Structures are given as structure tokens and as C-alpha cells.
Image (tube, rainbow, N blue to C red):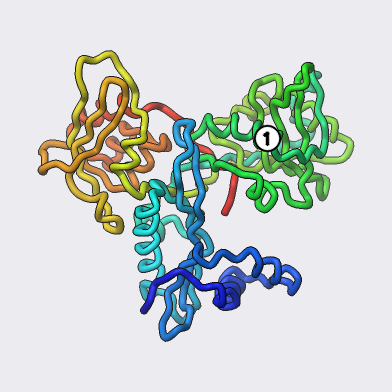
Amino acid sequence: MEIRPLRADEFESSLGLSEYAFQYKVKPEEREEQRKSFIPERSWGAFEGGELLAKLMLLPLHLYVQGRPVPMGGIAGVATWPEHRRSGLVRELLTAALRRMNEQGQHLSCLHPFSIPFYRKFGWEVYTDYKKYTIPIDSFPSKSYASGSVKRDVKDIELLNGIYHAFARRYNGMLVRDEEWWKRSVLGDRNHTAVYYTESGQPEGYLLYQVKNGELVIGEFVFLNETARQGLWAYLANHDSMVTQAVFDRVPADDLQPYLLRDPRCKQETVPYFMARIVNAAAFVADYSFTSRASAGPIRLGLRVEDGFAPWNGGDWQLEVSPEGKGNLSPADPVKPGLACDIQTLTAMLLGYKRPREMFACGKLSGLEEDAETLERLIPISQTALLDFF
């Protein structure tokens, strides 16, 4: 078996596998557009005798972590012909992808799982949830006419992107978007936008939505302050003669909207969403900002990491954090007692999805409780979110 990037002349083989695995058919005119945009080196395949048996895409993206862009390898389009499933092909592809990401300096990887247990076996872990609301029209907030104005169908990507990035930097795990991503993956032909402007003309929030079948379907509700939120809600409330309810999708998990409704007893769902894994623990820690403190010297903790698919992460380490919050993860002789966890748990803790105290309580982080409490103080409290899909 051969694991390698695809070649340009293997477009049809790749698309044929995707069409079969994901149960869709590309129209002839769309097929040619996809052929033109096909970047073969972003697709990796498992081959036997020249036949493509399985594949995945490895997308060069960036995520915000602590307000800074971090290189990330996005895994997408994982597919195998049915007669070759359960033969370890995806395992080989993911192992090769991890090696390539590590070589390219992509310290994180993310994917949307068809099965969370499946990808946990390879070191990925859920890192963010989203909320979904279904709000009847009679539960909408009372109309409050905030200062400023709202303009519909603004398609100025630079303007929208500026609002988005100011919002996205507040969260760990939000995608860094560029113009091409907005065109290809965000706006679409069916979506409306609405932008809130202050009285001085400053854009401070936007909606991405559709009106269909008597519903407002809001894909993104992005606001930089409470005034912008109220202004956008007043705009939504003006659809009361057209719709019976609003459905809000992929809302960040820390959103307070139900509490602010006249009647918060609307349908609310919390959905585990994307998974992430640290590709290179030492490199990730070196760029991470731990909590600074007034101290004369560094804090040192022994940490044993288990990672069966990225062996450069596994083993015994010493975590050293300076008073300024600068971290360093260096190989160490086995230190007992020390903390121990797998790469999944380390990812969840450093991204802020779960806290060390929680992980220690449920046994995912083991060792001395006082060391777990020290790690609890060292990792800043943060919130994760993701509005995108790939």
C-alpha cells in the first residue's frame, strides 16, 4: 500500500469516491469548476496497485488561540470505498497527516467527526459546543430601538470580516477567515446579511440569515457590544408579520440570549461540535500564554503525556512556566509523583474547553491533587467557539 498526495490527473478518482461516500452528485458544469479549483497536494490517498482506496483532505488553516492565529491542519473529506473499510486505511492516512502537519509547523488539527469515539482513538477530542435556539415570535425580546441603524444585504467582505475577527479573537478555536473563505464557505447565494452601524457610522455587528418556510434561520449573530445586539434584535423583530419563529444555529456556548428573552422557556439544544488535537505539544506550549503571577521564580510540574499516533508528544516532560506566563515543555526523566494525561485531555485543557480541576475529578488527569490545582491556576479561563464548517 502507498500513502501519498494525489496528482492532478486523479481528480476524477477523488471526486468519484467523495460522491459515493457522501451520497451526492456534482452537476457537469460544477464538475469543471471543481476541477479548476482542485489542489491535489491537499488531498492524501491510500493506493494499492494504482487504485485509490481511501482519502482525506488536509487544509492549511489558522485558528485563534488566545487572540493569536495558530497554524492548523483541517482534516476533511475522509472517505473509503466500502469494500476497503475496516482495514486500517484511515489509520494510516491520519498517521501520515499528523507527520505532515508536524513537519509544516501546524501545531493544531481540527475535524468534524462522523463519530466522536472513532476519532478519539487517534488523539482528537471535542473542543467546542454550540447552542441552537428555536424562539417563537411571541417570545422575542421587547422591541427596543437602540441608537444607530441596520442595513440589509451588505456584502462588503472587508467590513464583515473586520467585525467577525474582532468577535472571533474573544474565543479559542475560531477560524481565521480570508476573502476566499467568505466567498466560498460563508456568504453563499441564499444568505442575507444585516449590519448594525452606530450613529457615527461604525459597523459593530452583523447577521447572516435566511427567511424561509415562515422561519428566520440565523446562521451567524455577531455583535461587539450590547447596543449592537439590541439593534440587530430590533431588526429581527420587524419580521414579525412574516415568520412564526426564529432558529439560531451555531451560537457560542457562553451566549446569554435565552436569559434575556421575555420567556426563556424556548427550545434550547447544546451540541458537541468540532474536535481538535495538539499536533506538537512542546511547540504549542512554547507559544501559549499561561497565567502570569507575582513570583520570584518559575513553576515546574512533571507531566506524562500519552499519544499513540504522534510519538514525539508521548513520554515524560517537565512543564516550566515563568512568572510572566511563558511556558516550556522539555523532556524529563520519569518524575513521580507527577501529572499524567493523554493528548486528548491536554488539548481540551489548554484550549479552555475543560478545566484541570474537572479532568482530575473524573480521572482524565491523574497525579497529585496539589499539582492539578497548580495547573488549574496556570491555565487561563477561556471560552471556545466555532461558527464554521469544513
The residue positioned 49% from the left and 65% from the top of the image is 41
- The local crowd at label 1, few if under 14, some if 14 to 19, many if 20 or more residues have their Cα within 10 Å, is many
* Residue 330 figure quarter: top left
Q: Quadrant of the C terminus?
A: bottom right
The answer to whether 323 is drawn above or below residue 379 in the figure is above
Residue in the foreground of this view, choosing between 215 and 63: 63
Q: Position of residue 15 (x, y in %)?
A: 60, 73
Q: Position of residue 107 (x, y in %)?
A: 38, 46
* Residue 161 figure quarter: top right
* Residue 358 figure quarter: top left
Judge from the rendering whether residue 331 lies leftward or rightward of residue 322; answer left or right. left
Judge from the rendering whether residue 96 lies leftward or rightward of residue 43; answer left or right. left
The answer to whether 41 is drawn above or below residue 354 in the figure is below
Assign a secondary structure to mark 1.
strand
The residue positioned 16% from the left and 37% from the top of the image is 338
Residue at image mark 1 = 221
Q: Position of residue 216 (x, y in %)?
A: 77, 42
Q: Quadrant of the N terminus?
A: bottom left
